[in-house]
Image (cartoon, helix red, strand yellow):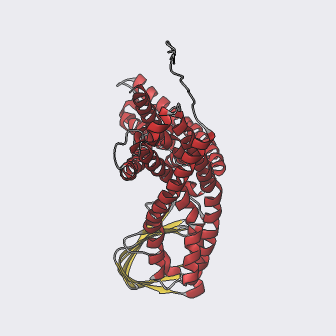
Amino acid sequence: MEVKTIKNIEPLEIKRSSSITIFRYIFVEMFFSFIICFCFFFFIFFVNQILLMAQEILTKHVPFGQVALLILFSMPMIIATSAPFASLVGTLMTVGRLTSDNEILVMLSSGLSYKAVFYPAIAIGIMVSVLSFITNDILLPAGTVQFNKLWRQILVSIPALELEANSVKRFKDTIIITGDVSGNAISNVIILDKTESGERRVIMAGTAELKDSGKEGLSLDLEEAFFHSSKEVAWDDYDYAQTEFLQYKVSNEDIIQAIMSVSPREMSSRDVNIAVKEKKAALAERVNSRKGRFAIQAAALENVLRAGTESDTWNTKYSSINSFRRELQSLKLIMEDRSLTIYIIELYRKFAVPFGAFFFVFLAVSLGLMAKKSGQTVGFIFGNIIAVIYWSLLFIGQTMGLRVGTPPFWSMWLPNILCFVAGVILAVIKVRR
């Protein structure tokens, strides 16, 4: 038998970026890991934020049913926070397991590329980001409204909930600063308030007893109290007195109004954006009005200095300089509107945190592809470390934005950008190897 050999036959190369079966397989694996990690993070945030609040109000004999409703209305905040970190850890665990079990190697050998891993991960990231944003932007404000309604009902029946040890509480035009609390006894109480006639008062007492006046609100029986009052328009017109006993009351209406305000974190992105525009308009109006006074003081100082030492106005130069400095400092304080900065930072945060899940997957896949052994365990550990670092960067960015003046965009979006850049760099290194 004659055997013919065929020479110069090049091996057949099959190059595919992905396949439906592989996509479905990896997607299901990542989704399953996401659910497990979501339950983990949900439990952590639940214990940290919700059970502590429940313990706080259960000690004041609030009915368990109302406590359960408060927890239920707080769920959107926990869900919106847990989902992005769950996508990070879940993706890292899945890719790490596929790599350590050589499944990634098998896929590459069959003609697939690394895109087969990135596609389902990106799909998970987009899905989680959208759901997290909806939860944060729609469900969270709705839950906050219901939470505040229920909390107002509880405070009407148990107003003593609003006073805690070593705290500062604001009730409409009243601020109460408390020291240590033992039962109904409070030490080192300071009360700052403003009457309807515009009179400002400062009341201090070494000890006070808290009483629940029912429908009337709170009642503080102050012992050895010192009382100081002054007119708002004339601070040199003041009065003071000292008494052995003084009863101070805070009405339920003032308590309810104190909790009706909603922070920007509990608002939708649309409402925060509207509030930012309103605050910018109000700030521009205040700055323009203040600039007129500043220009007057600057012109007055300039006239004094130009007149020289021989003029009669030279003796007033120090008062002119001090007036100019006060106006300049006042203008700086107005322009550095802390409230506006808080709203702008929160506006960027409402998009940065939910969509962080999308940026996480690039870093998670790249790190997972480098796993050697025990990829799932290592992925879980490294995922939690990255989550802690990411949360720390968010906190540092927010602090820098408020105190140093870092641009709000970079304060909130820098962690996402770092995750994306690091993921792309690691992916390029892995592909080249």
Q: Is residue 414 visible?
A: no
Residue at (41% x, 25% y) in the render: 432
Q: Residue 256: x percent and y percent?
A: 59, 72
State the image coordinates of residue 103 (x, y, percent, origin top left).
46, 42
In the foreground, 118 or 276: 118
Front in this rendered view, residue 64 or 335:
64
Establish if 262 lies above or below 348: below
When the figure is inspected, residue 129 is found, relative to residue 410, above or below; the finding is below
Whether residue 275 is visible to the viewer of this picture, yes or no, is yes
Q: Residue at x 51, y 16 (%)?
A: 2
Residue, x 59% and y 37% (percent of image)? Answer: 288
Measured from the top left, where is residue 186 in percent x and y? Answer: 37, 80
Vertical order, 243 against 381 (above or below)? below
Report x, y in % for residue 428: 43, 28
Q: Residue furthest top?
A: 8
Q: Is residue 385 above or below residue 167?
A: above
- In the picture, measured across the screen, residue 301 lies left or right of residue 28, that is left
In the image, 52 versus 31, the foreground residue is: 31
In this rendering, the count of numbered labels is: 0
Q: Which quarter of the rendered picture does the C terminus lie within?
A: top left
